[in-house]
Image (cartoon, rainbow, N blue to C red):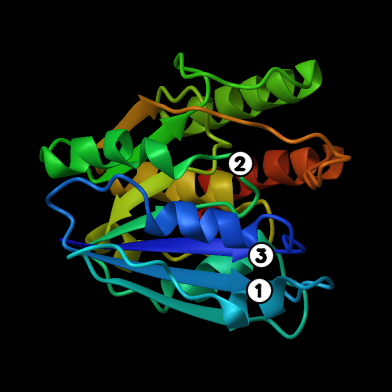
């Protein structure tokens, strides 16, 4: 099975190389025969593009690991970067991986397991199901819980972490997605569209090492307002 990892990046010069190394060297299940990493630089103002241009994945034994990257000439947002990446991937299973070291590719075996067992077409990695995590901002937790509850009320799903980065899904799901969000509206849009498909969705616990704003965290209250609008928009009007 070939897996494709899509890594959107914006001003992640300090972490992008380590993230890519962790992705390339992750403990993939035996069923994974080939790894494809697609990074998308969303018009970073630091040295992210230079790091991507110089990057070569380390040798991964008998499992081929191929790397490619693309760059937006204007900053368009995470959702747009993911759409660019999704258009390039060729794997049977696709993984969304943030570039900031908050999410650990060591969790990949748990994320792949429900799909490999034939139990799911979509797997969500939840930060709130018991995995180890760095304790940070109380109001971020409250905001995440509220957004997830609001999303669940519309979708009928019983998710614990709608805003998580880790979303793993089959190629068939990717081909049915018609994503339009440019920025952080990707999370509620993805959830709404997957729920409307009626595919099987699993959640698994993951670890989480959240950053502070001083360390480079970008999401803020305005993104939360956008997420609320997107929950209504994509669940009520579907576009």
- Residue topped by disc 3: 182
Q: Secondary structure at mark 1?
A: helix
Residue 58 x %, y %: 40, 66
Query: Could you say which quadrant of the image residue 141 lies in?
Result: top right
Q: Residues within 10 Å of mark 2 (few under 14, many from 20)?
A: many
Residue 70 x %, y %: 57, 81
Quadrant location of the N terminus in the rendered image = bottom left
Q: CA distance from mark 1 to mark 3?
A: 24 Å
- Residue topped by disc 2: 231
Q: Is residue 73 visible?
A: yes
Quadrant location of the C terminus in the rendered image = bottom right
For the image, the number of numbered tags is: 3
Is residue 108 rendered to the left or right of residue 155?
A: left
Q: Is residue 181 visible?
A: no
Question: Of circles 1 and 3, which is in front?
Answer: 1
Give the label on residue 51, or none: 1
Q: Secondary structure at mark 2?
A: helix
Q: Nearer the viewer, residue 170 or 214?
A: 214
- Which residue shows up at 34% across the image and 42% down it? 108
Residue 230 x %, y %: 65, 47
Vertical position of residue 213 compared to residue 141: above or below: below
Q: Earlier in the sequence, mark 2 or mark 1?
A: 1
Q: Earlier in the sequence, mark 1 or mark 3?
A: 1
């Amino acid at each position: 099975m070939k897996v494709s990892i899509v890594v959107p990046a914006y001003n992640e010069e300090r972490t992008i190389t380590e993230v890519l190394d962790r992705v390339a060297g992750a403990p993939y299940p035996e069923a994974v025969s080939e790894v494809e990493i697609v990074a998308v630089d969303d018009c970073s103002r630091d040295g992210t593009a230079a790091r991507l241009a110089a990057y070569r994945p380390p040798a991964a034994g008998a499992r081929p690991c191929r790397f490619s990257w693309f760059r937006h000439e204007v900053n368009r947002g995470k959702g747009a970067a993911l759409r660019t990446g999704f258009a390039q991937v060729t794997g049977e299973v696709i993984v969304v991986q943030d570039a900031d070291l908050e999410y650990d590719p060591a969790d990949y075996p748990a994320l792949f397991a429900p799909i490999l067992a034939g139990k799911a077409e979509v797997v969500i990695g939840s930060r709130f199901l018991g995995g180890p995590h760095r304790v940070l901002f109380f109001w971020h937790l409250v905001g995440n819980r509220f957004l997830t509850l609001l999303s669940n009320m519309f979708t009928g799903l019983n998710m614990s972490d709608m805003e998580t980065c880790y979303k793993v899904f089959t190629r068939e799901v990717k081909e049915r997605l018609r994503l339009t969000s440019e920025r952080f509206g990707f999370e509620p849009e993805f959830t709404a569209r997957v729920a409307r498909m009626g595919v099987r969705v699993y959640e698994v616990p993951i670890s989480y090492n959240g950053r502070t704003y001083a360390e480079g965290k970008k999401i803020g209250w305005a993104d939360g307002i956008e997420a609320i609008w997107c929950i209504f928009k994509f669940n009520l009007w579907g576009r």
